[in-house]
Amino acid sequence: MTALHGYDIPHLPGVITPGEIAESAEHLVSLQQSSGMIPWFPGGHCDPWNHVESAMALDVAGRSAEAALAYDWLATIQRPDGAWHNYYVADGNNDSTVSESKLDTNVCAYVATGVLHHVLCASSDDERGLRIERRWPMVKSALDWVLSHRRDDGLVLWAVEPDAQPWDYALLTGTSSIQHALRCGAVLASLIGEDATNWVTAADLMREAINDRPECFEDKSRWAMDWYYPVLTGALTGSSATDRLSSGWDTFVMGEIGTRCVSDEPWVTASETAETALSYAAVGDLDTATQLLEWTRRHRRSDGSYWTGIVHPDHIVFPDQEHTSYTAAAVILAADSIYQSSPASALFRFDIANPTDC
């Protein structure tokens, strides 16, 4: 199946078909508010990070107009300082009502990753230029705000309270994502003729800490994301990346079921499983990536959505009856990374030429 934008929809036989990706994208569109906001589920809240992930999935599925609307909403509700609050709920008026006011640096940085993905998926050079010009002010403001919360060692504090009181530690997962977002922002800067040397320098310092100074981060080793996210974002590459994935497999992966969200609970989530697939694709192990993505099928519902998590061995859906937008989005992004279909499919691949190589 070829989408209207001219590139193929991912097709992994026995794992996910183009028709199933279209169904999942339609589910995301059904959740999207007229403002562009994409909540987790009907009547649920929206956080900007998972909102961006859903927007990227829409682009992969050829729903570029809906993806653009998602970025429009982010631009509309962005704070004057460049940040976003953690959670928003629909209110019929730009959907700007805040339900959790914390400001998360990783959440705010991720818009750069999404916008580069959106730009790469443009159907022509002219459209690519228009997307950069339209989104650049939002990206620059966000990344400048994020870097204003660096510690003396170059790492970014996890979060800031609305009264400007920062939290006192940095996170490995968040830092991994931020350094990738900074590199995405630097690519956008180069395309529009702006200097982003400071963003690349900051990203390099973060990558160095991830590789050589793990003690700098708050211990969250119980969580699967701290295992695979340095690989998914290219903070670790080569043998360092493959060694990390190998060392955590038995801790986090339940054989032929999927990835545990946390190491000490039998709760397998489809999003963590799909992101583990993204991480294996990032190092070029497409067989393992495909196998992991196949395991998400037991979470798939008839409408194209996915149960957030299942507790084994009793097969209990948890949270109860919850099927989340970001879960379907993670599956679509993993399929694209493995299949290499969209023009942005290499954004999370570090075994081949990556758009952030600059």
Image: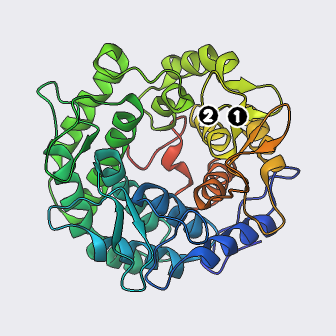
Residue lying at 51% horizontally and 58% vertically, measured from the top left: 53
In the image, 195: left or right of 275?
left
User: Is there CB contact under 8 Å for labels 2 and 1?
Assistant: yes
Crowding at dot 2, Cα within 10 Å, few <14 / some 14-19 / many 20+, comes out as many
Q: Quadrant of residue 89?
A: bottom left
Q: Nearer the viewer, residue 5 or 28?
A: 28
Q: Earlier in the sequence, mark 2 or mark 1?
A: 2
Visible in this render: residue 188? yes
Query: Which type of secondary structure does the marked residue at label 1 adopt?
Result: strand
> For the residue marked with disc 1, what is the amino acid?
Trp
* Place of residue 76 in the rendered image (x, y in percent of width and height, measured from the top left): 29, 77
Residue lying at 63% horizontally and 58% vertically, measured from the top left: 324
Residue lying at 70% horizontally and 65% vertically, measured from the top left: 9
Quarter holding the C terminus is top left
> For the residue marked with disc 2, what is the amino acid?
Cys
Count of residue discs: 2
* Place of residue 113 in the rendered image (x, y in percent of width and height, measured from the top left): 39, 54
| Disc 2 from disc 1: Cα separation | 6 Å
Quarter holding the N terminus is bottom right
Residue ID for mark 1: 267
Residue ID for mark 2: 261
Residue 347 vertical position relative to residue 266 in the rendered view, above or below: below
